[in-house]
Amino acid sequence: ATASGHASIAGTPDDFEGTLRILGSPPEIPDLRVDSEPRADASFWFRGGGFEAQAVVHPVRFRITSDLLRAEGDTPEGRLRLRRPAEDTDLGLGLEAAGGRIELPGYDLSLAKIGVSARVEERGVEGKLRVGELRDLQSPPRLEPLGLRGTFEIRNSTIGYHLKLANPGESLVLEAKGGADPAVPSARDELRLHPLVFDPAGLQPAALFPFLEGQVEAATGSVEASGTASWDGARATAEIDLALREIGFAARGTEVLDLNGRIEIGGPSPPVTR
């Protein structure tokens, strides 16, 4: 990849301000195609030992075609801010990104309304993540549209996070809290599916899973789950405890009433039940 730019600067060596536009060529990375020209606009000032620089990184259209991941879409617009108000103050770096759209053809999923904000400090990085719309592209959809929100932090090589995936009314909520260390590599998550409470006059499975429309009706009772998942760099394992409480439903002429029990799901793929 190559880059060119145009700068405008006014002032004296110890008191100046200016703007900068950078135009780049698409990077040459295997399995990555960038269909639009990378572009960024920046402004900056330096005065009395303090300085500030801000940059807007404009969206680009991209496509990934590796064996591990197929994705295409538009990156969010990014904003960077580097600031030190005075000579004897700490340096601050902030990042924000908003917008964008990503499709994952291999999973029939799309992500939109993406937002990321992060603050870089001496002790590490802290930030927030948001995906306003996670949509299933199959017809009928397997899931109704969901949203993702969470926080993350980076300390040395360790990444910690707390994520919540939910539908707009939060009748379906899945939480993941854990950490990963890419240098080892390893990861461990605590998972929780909040209780799904079904009522013939209220929530029904087809409202959450549209492909069940006309197949499962008059559902009652609740379902919840909790457990852990881990990865040691070679394989992934999971231990999930699924609880069924007073489950009832009608499906294709069959009626189930007052089903209670616990199901333990564990092991690597394919999962096994106990």
Image (spheres, grey):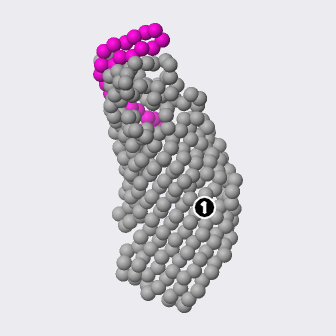
Give SS at disc 1: loop
Q: Between 1 and 213, which is closer to the camera in this rendering? A: 213
Judge the density around disc 1: few (<14), some (14-19), many (≥20) Cα neighbours within 10 Å: some
The magenta stretch is 231-258
Residue at horizontal 59 percent and vertical 29 percent from the top: 139
Q: Residue furthest bottom?
A: 12
Is 272 in the magenta? no
Residue at image coords 45%, 14%: 251
> Disc 1 marks which amino acid?
His
> Measured from the top left, where is residue 248 in percent x and y?
35, 17
Q: Is residue 166 above or below residue 123?
A: above
Res 223 visible: no
Q: Please name the residue shown 41% across and 78% down the image.
A: 85
- Residue 189 lies, in percent from the top left, at 37, 40
Q: Is residue 134 left or right of residue 247?
A: right
Q: For the N terminus, which image quadrant?
A: bottom right
The overriding secondary structure of the stretch rendered in magenta is strand
Which residue, given by chain and number where applicable, does mark 1 sit on? 58
Up the image or down, 102 lies above or below 6; here it is above
| Magenta residue check for 250 | yes
Of all residues shown, which one is farthest toward the top?
253
Point 43% across, 29% down: residue: 268
